[in-house]
Amino acid sequence: MSAALNIGNFGTDASAKKRMIVMAKYSLGVTTDYLEDPRLEVRDVTGKVIAQNQDWILNSEEVKTAITKTGLMTGYRDKEAALILTVDPGSYFIDVYSQDGDSGGSLVEVYDLDLLESLYGWDLGAGTAQ
């Protein structure tokens, strides 16, 4: 499963980087054939993998803490994929694969962490970028 994502900055600095959280979760209720163990890859326009994750719980302690603070993985299994990365404005591709060779669908979510921090008063840490 692949998806394209265009990241633009709508602030005063059009060249500013964005901190994003990207997640691939089982989509129970959306499809009956979901990936049991998704693997997530974010690629730039050249196809180069710039970030990847297979089990969100395997991230560094700092990243796990930031993801946990958002509540976006609450209720999901440790083997769902999630990562935090900082990107320049541009186009990116998100690929989700089965870690165990299964086929099926996955729910992919992408959020602007800088915006979430400003809206909810969170401090997720400046060093949460991959």
Image (cartoon, rainbow, N blue to C red):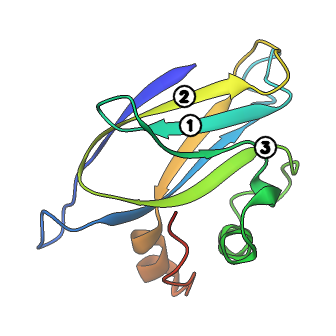
Q: Are marks 3 and 1 in contact (CB under 8 Å)?
A: no
Residue wearing tag 2: 95
State whether residue 108 is above or below residue 104: below
CA separation, marks 3 and 1?
13 Å
Residue at point 29%, 32% (across, down): 45
Residue at point 65%, 74% (across, down): 66
State whether residue 37 is above or below residue 59: above
| In-front residue for pair 33/4 | 4
Q: Do the residues labelled 1 and 2 touch (CB within 8 Å)?
A: yes
Residue wearing tag 1: 41
| In-front residue for pair 121/58 | 58
Is label 3 in a helix, a strand or a loop?
A: loop
Question: What amino acid is labelled 1 in the image?
Answer: Glu
Question: What amino acid is labelled 3 in the image?
Answer: Glu
Residue at point 46%, 26% (across, down): 3
Q: Nearer the viewer, mark 3 or mark 1?
A: 1
Q: In which quarter of the image is residue 15?
A: bottom left
Q: Residue 120: x and y, percent?
A: 52, 81
Residue at point 86%, 54% (across, down): 75
Is label 2 in a helix, a strand or a loop?
A: strand
Question: What amino acid is labelled 2 in the image?
Answer: Asp
Residue 80: numbered disc: 3
The disc, 3 or 2, on the residue closer to the chain's N-terminal end is: 3
Is label 1 in a helix, a strand or a loop?
A: strand
Quadrant of the frame with the N terminus: top right
Q: How many marks?
A: 3
Side of 106 relative to 76 (left or right) = left
Q: How crowded is mark 3: few (under 14 residues within 10 Å), some or many (20 or more)?
A: many
Q: Residue 9: x and y, percent?
A: 21, 60
Q: How crowded is mark 1: few (under 14 residues within 10 Å), some or many (20 or more)?
A: many
Q: Residue 71: x and y, percent?
A: 72, 66
